[in-house]
Image (cartoon, rainbow, N blue to C red):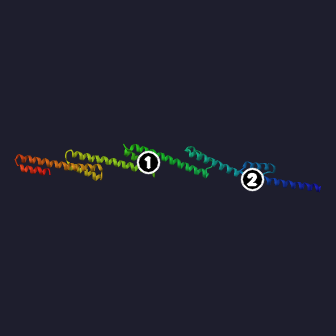
Amino acid sequence: PELMAALTRAQEALSVRQRAEAIESAKRNARQALQSGNFDDALQVVAETAKIHGLSADFQRLREQIVAAKTTWERDQFIGTTARQCEQWWREGRFQEALKGVEAALQKYPDAPALTDLARALRADWERRQRGEAVRRVLADARARLDDEPAKAIDLLRAANTRFPGEAELESALASAEETLRAVERAKASERFAAEANAYLVQNEFHRALDALDRGLRAYPGDGSLTSLRDAVASRRVAWEREQEIAEAIRGGQVLLAQRQFEQAERAAAAAFE
C-alpha cells in the first residue's frame, strides 16, 4: 500500500508539473503570436489550453490583453485605410466622397486624431475652394458690367469685399473699378465744360468760353482735353481780336479815302498790318 501511495503521489506530481509546463508553453506561444500580430492564433492557443487545463487568472489576463491588442490593431487599420482612401479622393477632387467617408469613420471612432485632423483639413479646403469660386463669379460679373454699368460693378465688388475680406483680387478689382468710374465721371464732366465753352465760342464770347474751361480745370487740374481746348480758344480769341482790329482799320481807311486823306489812310493801313 505504501508503494502504491508513493506511486500515486509521483504520478500526481508529474501531472501537475506537466500541466504547469504545458500552461507555460502555451503562454509563451500565445505571447509570441501576440507580438507577431497573429491575434487569432494567440486567442486559439488560449482557448485550446483553457479547454484542457481551465482558464486561470493568468490566462484570463492574457486573453484580455490579446483581445485589447487586436481591437487596437483593427481600429488603427480601419482608421489608416479610411484616411488613405479619403486622402486619395481628396487629391482627385472628390471632396464630397472624401468628407462623407471621414465623417462616417468619425461616427465609429470620434476621438481619432488622424480622422479629426483630416476632416478639419477637408472642410477648410472645401470652404477655401467654394470661396475662391464665389470670388471668381463676382469678378466675372463685375467685369461684364464695368463698361456699361460701372456703378453696379462697384456695388458688387464692395459687397464681395465685405463678404470675403482680405481677397487681393477683389480689393484690386474694386480699386480699378472705382478709378474707372472716376475717369468716366471726369470725362463726362470734361465734356460738359467743353460743350459749354464751345457754345460760347460759336458766338465769339471768348471770355465766357475761357471762364467755363477755367472752372473745369479747377475741378479737374491737368485735364488734357480741357487744357488743349483752352489753348485753342485763347489762340482763336487772339486771332479774332486781330481780325477785328484789321477790319476796324480797313473801315477807318475807307472813311479817310472817302475824305481824300490819302496819307492818313496809308498810315492807318500800315499800322493795322504791322
Residue 134 visible to an observer of this rendering? yes
- Quarter that holds the N terminus: bottom right
Considering every residue shown, the one lying at the far right of the view is: 1
Residue beneath the point at 90% across and 54% down? 8
| Three-letter code, disc 1 | Ala
Can residue 103 be seen by looking at this rendering? no
x and y percentages locating residue 147 in the rendered image:
37, 44
242 sits to left or right of 101? left
Secondary structure under the numbered disc 2 in the rendered image? helix
Foreground pick, 31 / 234: 234
Q: Which residue is mark 2?
A: 32
In screen coordinates, is 222 left or right of 200?
right
Name the residue tied to disc 1.
160
| Label 2 neighbour load within 10 Å: few <14, some 14-19, many 20+ | some
| Gap in angstroms between the C-alphas marked 1 and 2 | 64 Å
Q: How many marks?
A: 2
Residue 54 on image: x %, y %: 80, 51
* Percent x, y of residue 152: 38, 45
Tell me whether the residue at label 1 lies in contact with that at label 2, contact meaning CB atoms closer than 8 angstroms: no
Query: At label 2, which amino acid type do we have?
Result: Gln
Residue at x-position 34% and y-position 48%: 183
Q: Is residue 248 left or right of residue 233?
A: left
- Decide which of tag 1 and tag 2 comes sooner along the chain: 2
What residue lies at 6% left-to-right and 47% top-to-bottom? 257
> Residue 86: percent from the left, percent from the top?
59, 46
Residue 3's mark?
A: none
- Which residue: 28% across, 52% down? 217
Label 1 vs label 2, nearer the camera: 2
